[in-house]
Image (spheres, helix red, strand yellow):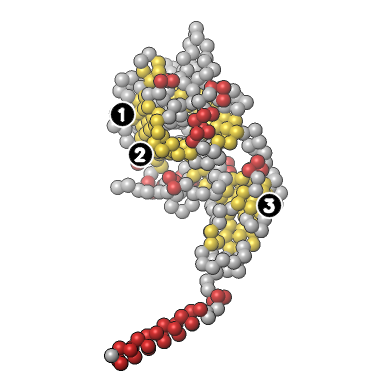
Amino acid sequence: MKKILRVILIFCLLFTLIACKDNNQNTDDLQKGEIILPVAMNVDSTDGAVKIPFETTGDEETINWSIDNTSVATVDEDGFITTHGNGQAIITATNSSFTSTMHLVASKDKYINYTRIKSKLEFLFIFSNPSNFNSPDQFYLLDTDIDFNGDSISPIGGWDLSNDETPIDSSRQFRATLDGRGYALKNFKIINPSTTKVDQSYFGVSLIPFIYDGKVVNLNIIDAIFSGSGFTGSIAGKIEKGTIENCFVKATITATLANPGIPAGGIAGIIGADALIKNVILDVKVNGGFIYSGFNFGTGLNSNAISKTLADTIRRPIQNTAITTNKGDENEDAALKDFVNSRRIEDDELGDMDKYTLTEDAKANVWTITNGYMPFIIRRDGLTPSWAKISINP
């Protein structure tokens, strides 16, 4: 019994000595915290003061902020950015042990006339009313990612029903500007919606069935399903004229066998002669169609498709778009065109920005990349989107 008590007393004494040693340890001997900054941020003066979402490891200490171009932006002692002009800068954060830098793209009053959309309910409410999207004087901006939680949603507007006798229906056409700001519309389905129905079929099934001189830029569409009878696309069923630029799409797009002559496309079903498609990256599965568009009469430039998801159970989309001869007449308006300077990206190229055919201006000002991720659009919040993480499936 005495032996047991002696052991217990010795153990307690040792424990007390160790505890005292730990409590008296000088905090200056601890490792200082590394500063972790976003890869890049895109901040406009209309955003107000935007806090850099930095993190530190180890113990906390004062961080000193600086910027190499104060004509475009300033950063205060708490890491809040305020922009004053247009341009780029490098922001630096330092403490006694570490230095980290971040790329800033700054703009002034770029979004001063834009309506900011901050929720699923706002998005659905705004775009349920044609008067909110059928004028070129309307501008919309995503202010966050919007997750539809797997819901089936209605498209923005409807398919073009115009012909020689019937004028364009303004309640169906999209003429506004939608700037995704690098944020995403996520996890939704558009399948045979009634607003696109034509002659017992479902034409133009897409986020926007009929873009008529409108713009969709800097937008991500993630984990979406589009299914119709023909001219099905992700962003547009038909873009008569207008622009789709700097967009990323991860989706499944299907035009059924019921109408084999009206194929689907990863971006759009039909691209009109006055439309411009530029700097688009696709991670899509296209059933019953082609990689970028069903028919392309317009200008398609600098776009990329990730090879590993291009398998087609109906018709393998080995072509960028349907291509036919123009019967020897080079000036024929209806001559179909291929996408220029566009290529497929293989698994071992996903994280290499130099392999993508995005324009150099877009690479410097809009798109960025970090280790282990595909290119993604620079967001205001500085976050690296999880959907861009490279995962190679066997």
Residue 143: numbered disc: none
Find the distance from the CA under tag 3 to the CA under tag 2.
43 Å
Q: Amino acid at mark 1?
A: Arg
Q: Is residue 50 above or below residue 247?
A: below
Say what secondary structure mark 3 lies in.
strand
- Left or right of 140 on screen, residue 315: left
Q: Which residue is more in the foreground, 347 or 191? A: 191
Q: Looking at the figure, which quarter contains the N terminus?
A: bottom left
Label 3 with label 1: CB-CB less than 8 Å: no
Find the distance from the CA under tag 2 to the CA under tag 1.
14 Å
Mark earlier in primary sequence (3, 1) = 3
- Outermost residue toward the top in this view: 165
Q: Is residue 311 above or below residue 33?
A: above
Number of other residues with Cα within 10 Å of mark 3, as a class: few under 14, some 14 to 19, many 20 or more: many
Residue 309: numbered disc: 2
- Outermost residue toward the front in this view: 1
| Residue 194 shows in the view | yes
Q: Which residue is more in the foreground, 38 or 326? A: 38
- Left or right of 239 on screen, residue 4: left
Say what secondary structure mark 1 lies in.
loop
Q: Amino acid at mark 2?
A: Thr
State the residue at coordinates (46%, 24%).
209
Q: Position of residue 145 (x, y in %)?
A: 49, 41
Q: Position of residue 231 (x, y in %)?
A: 40, 23
State the residue at coordinates (33%, 27%).
288
Find the distance from the CA under tag 3 to the CA under tag 1.
54 Å
- Outermost residue toward the bottom in this view: 2
Q: Amino acid at mark 3?
A: Thr
Number of other residues with Cα within 10 Å of mark 1, as a class: few under 14, some 14 to 19, many 20 or more: some
Residue 74: numbered disc: 3
Q: Which residue is mark 1?
A: 315
Mark earlier in primary sequence (3, 2) = 3
